[in-house]
Image: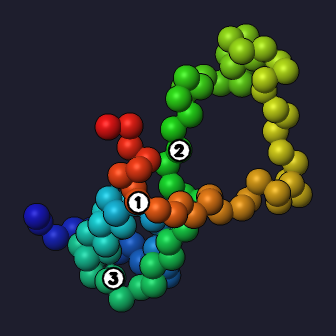
Amino acid sequence: MPRLTGARAACRFDVMYTSRLQRAIRTGVTVLGELGQLWIPIEQTWRLNERHYGALQGLDKKETVEKHGAEQVPPPPSRTDWTRLVPPPVLTGHVSSLLPY
């Protein structure tokens, strides 16, 4: 892969923020390597992990209300509603017990 030049090579970062997904970490480290900045700290957080919302995926709030009804759609959290900012539960046991097959 060719080394970056010009404006891209001039990018300087103080820290790399990433989800805990391996592909995101690898991509970030690859970019830092190309920029010659492998020395910067890497902050990982589950809050940046992708989420999949099943049947709600791709629907905006209006479409969700039309499809499932207003009583099923919670109001948006206020800026001070910190109760939603809790880490996901830790799973115990074997991962194979969670798989359907």
Left or right: 9, with 41 as reference point: left
Q: Nearer the viewer, residue 5 or 29?
A: 29
Above or below, 16 relative to 41: above
Q: Nearer the viewer, residue 41 or 71?
A: 71
Identity, as a three-letter code, of the amino acid under mark 1 = His
Question: How far apart are the two marked residues, 1 and 3, measured between alpha carbons?
Answer: 38 Å
Image coordinates for residue 42, horizontal then vertical, percent: 45, 79
Above or below, 10 relative to 92: below
Q: Are marks 1 and 3 in contact (CB under 8 Å)?
A: no
Q: Nearer the viewer, residue 36 or 72?
A: 72
Q: Tag 3 or tag 1, which sits nearer the N-term?
A: 3
Above or below, 63 relative to 40: above
| Label 1 crowd (10 A; few <14 / some 14-19 / many >=20) | few
Identity, as a three-letter code, of the amino acid under mark 3 = Gln
Residue bearing the label numbered 2: 51
| Label 2 crowd (10 A; few <14 / some 14-19 / many >=20) | few
Residue found at the very far top of the displayed protein: 66
Residue bearing the label numbered 3: 37
Q: Nearer the viewer, mark 1 or mark 3?
A: 1
Residue sitting at x 40%, y 60% = 94
Q: Secondary structure at mark 2?
A: loop
Identity, as a three-letter code, of the amino acid under mark 2 = Arg
Image coordinates for residue 57, horizontal then vertical, percent: 54, 28
Left or right: 79, with 12 as reference point: right
The quadrant in which residue 32 appears is bottom left
User: Looking at the image, can residue 100 be seen?
Assistant: yes
Residue sitting at x 33%, y 82% = 37
- Looking at the rendering, in which quadrant would you find the N terminus? bottom left
In the picture, the disc for residue 94 is 1
The quadrant in which residue 59 appears is top right
